[in-house]
Amino acid sequence: MFRALLSVLTGAVLAVVVAPALPAHAGIWHEYPFPANRTCSDSRVYNGTAYQVCLEFNSARTQVRSIAFINPGAYTNFQVNLRLRFGGGGPDISDSCPTMTTNASRACYTAFTDLRRPYVVTEATFGIAGTWQLPVRALDMRLSAKEQERDNWCGPGVVQTTLATMGYSAPPQSDLAARLHTDEMLFGVTMPGKIPAAINSYIPDSDWQYKWEEIAVSNGQTYEAGINRIVASLSRGRPVMILVIPGRLPWNTSAGPLLRHYLTIHGYGGVVHADGSVHPSTFKVADPADASEHSIDVDELLLDNANLAWNGIDTVAIVRT
């Protein structure tokens, strides 16, 4: 699930930020660790040096750590400040790796920490060749992915995944299929408009309530606003469900063009702009077809895979808080 750093380093010069204060604890630079289940920001490039930050999970997905990766294109100096924090009053861990000069790839990481709800987020601020870059961020949740129990039960599967990921007792998919009227519809489909009432019936009124909407992706302004609403829901520790055309997914090219499918978006990676806003470049999704996790480019998911899935026009159907 790890998006590799660019092997051919290209890119534009990035905006700079004021040097942040160093954390109280200092770590050391390491060689790259072995590949693992990770939720990452995209690679960014400054002065020929690629860098990114990832959340890395243990094999049981019960623990998490923050890893900052850097890949210099030539001898250069770099340093990084890391922060790993949890929503809901969980731990807030700061670390840093001091200035180093080399042309070798290096990684700076925190210790593994128990994964907590509602979400975990990491940020890394890199100083490269004496210039501080905009922070990069990755956010994810304590995912509890569920596999759909029937060919047409992807809707019940994503609702079950969403409830379990939030920490609520996940009802049987048969109960969810009944609430969603999945098997009563033509071709056994789950209509997106049926999902909010079904999922809200299992969560208290005091919690964030789910709603569904169509994002008009042909308009740049409404498209960006839709992405922001997805990020807002994820930043509450609340997954987002999205309708896609499964045959367009990079990991599922066998499905026909008429089939429709649901995924659960549970994480993202992106850059933090100077005003504090986040623009994600990557989403992390769970596929109920086999309860697998995948990283996918935001535009690839929304414009290439989800666009036209609902009503045949330039809109994307999502269910979010």
Image: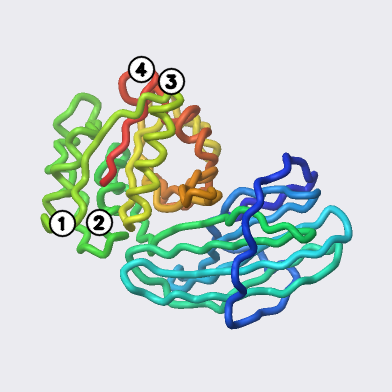
Q: Secondary structure at mark 2?
A: helix
Furthest toward the front, the residue is 18
| Residue 288 appears in the rendering | no
In the rendered view, does 34 fall on the left or right side of 321?
Answer: right
Q: Amino acid at mark 2?
A: Leu
Q: Quick check: marks 2 and 3 in contact, CB under 8 Å?
A: no
Q: Quadrant of residue 250?
A: top right
Mark earlier in primary sequence (2, 3): 2
How many labels, in total? 4
How far apart in space, not on screen, are marks 1 and 4 (Cα)? 32 Å
Give the foreground label among 1 and 4. 1
- Give the residue number, with chain letter if any, for mark 4: 312
Q: Residues within 10 Å of mark 3 (few under 14, many from 20)?
A: few
Whole-angstrom CA distance, mark 2 to mark 3, is 31 Å
Marks 1 and 3, how far apart at CA: 34 Å
Q: Position of residue 237 (x, y in %)?
A: 33, 58
Marks 2 and 3: which is nearer the front?
A: 3
Name the residue that disc number 3 marks: 218
Looking at the rendered structure, the kind of residue marked 1 is: Ile
Q: What SS does tag 3 mark?
A: loop
Using the numbered discs, state the Cα–Cα distance from disc 2 to disc 4 in whole angstroms: 29 Å
Residue at 62% across, 59% down = 18
**Residue that carries the numbered disc 2 in the rendered image:** 163
Q: Is residue 290 left or right of residue 12?
A: left
